[in-house]
Amino acid sequence: MLRGKVIIITGASSGIGLASARLLGAHGNCLVLAARSLDRLEALAAEILADPSTPPETEILCVRTDISVEEDCRRMVEQALARFGRIDILINNAGLSMRALFIDTDLSVIRRLMDVNFWGTVYCTKYALPSILAQKGSVVGVISTAGYAGLPARSGYSSSKFAVRGFLDTLRIEHVNDGLHVLVFAPGFTTSNVRNAALTADGTPQGSSPRDESRMMSAEKVARKLERAIVRRKREVILTFIAHVELFVQRHLPRHMDRWAYDYMKREPGSPLK
């Protein structure tokens, strides 16, 4: 397990970010929790620190951060360095999804997805990287299997996750001699708030999940797998058996994969696919 590290977690107020904060806080790390909702972050920090099992060396800094805003990301990293003096690990977890056919989607929705998912990762990495390099630490991008195979009615989401994967793969190559660890971490469908907050064609939040969340991998289980991947300095992790099957079929039988993906996503309640 990770212990005694300074770790930034973006999107820490819910889902995988929240579960990761609880797990890593319980292991005696110094956490920098970033999200737009400072109230949620502070409530989470109080919960972690009040737990009798939390090691006394655990410290938590909460920073209100809109990762789509470069200045917010720079300020968040500066506060982390001012408080803890270094950064060992950056977990780029914050993300936004969508559900709409591209032909119906306002282009502002695509821009919003790129601003949050891609540019948020770029901004945070840019300002944290010098300190992480000095520690020979880790840069993590939580993407999705949609970053490997196009997901119908998720054009902006898939595009942004493909972009994050390309960015991180390139970063890894650029620093292959520097001891930098870069992890591309791709969960499958996970219990979280991401589908509730997903944008529709006009940019309004979807408001509810179209899927049975009880059948998905829990955010807590994903957080444990994420921590293990960082400890083992993995370069890539794709969770769930079905995701591996999907990518195998895409590589060897791409036409079949296109039809399967369409038919599978069409079964969602209220799907825009017909």
Image: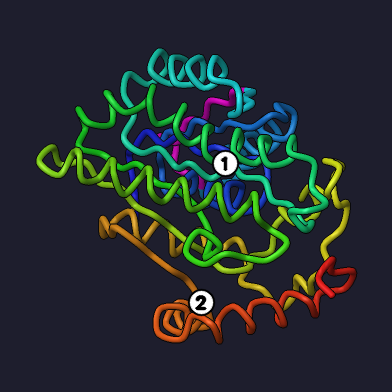
SS for dot 2:
helix
Q: Which residue occupies the foreground of this view, 97 or 53? A: 97
Identified at 34% across, 52% down, the residue is 183
10 Å crowding of disc 1: few (<14), some (14-19), many (20+): many
Relative to residue 101, is residue 55 depicted above or below? above
Q: Tell me, yes or no, whether the two marked residues, 1 and 2, touch with CB atoms within 8 Å.
A: no
Type of the residue with mark 1:
Asn
Q: Which residue occupies the foreground of this view, 188 or 201? A: 201
Relative to residue 204, is residue 158 depicted above or below? below
> Mark 2 = which residue?
243
Which is more N-terminal, label 2 or label 1?
A: 1
> Mark 1 = which residue?
117
SS for dot 1:
helix
Give the image quarter of residue 210. bottom right
The question of residue 74 being in magenta is answered with no
Relative to residue 240, is residue 80 depicted above or below? above
10 Å crowding of disc 2: few (<14), some (14-19), many (20+): many
80 sits left or right of 106 in the view = left
Residue 252 pos. (x, y %): 40, 84
Identified at 49% across, 80% down, the residue is 254
Residue 206 pos. (x, y %): 86, 52
The question of residue 61 being in magenta is answered with yes
Q: Distance between the residues labelled 1 and 2?
A: 21 Å
Type of the residue with mark 2:
Ala
Q: What stretch is highlighted in magenta?
A: 54-63
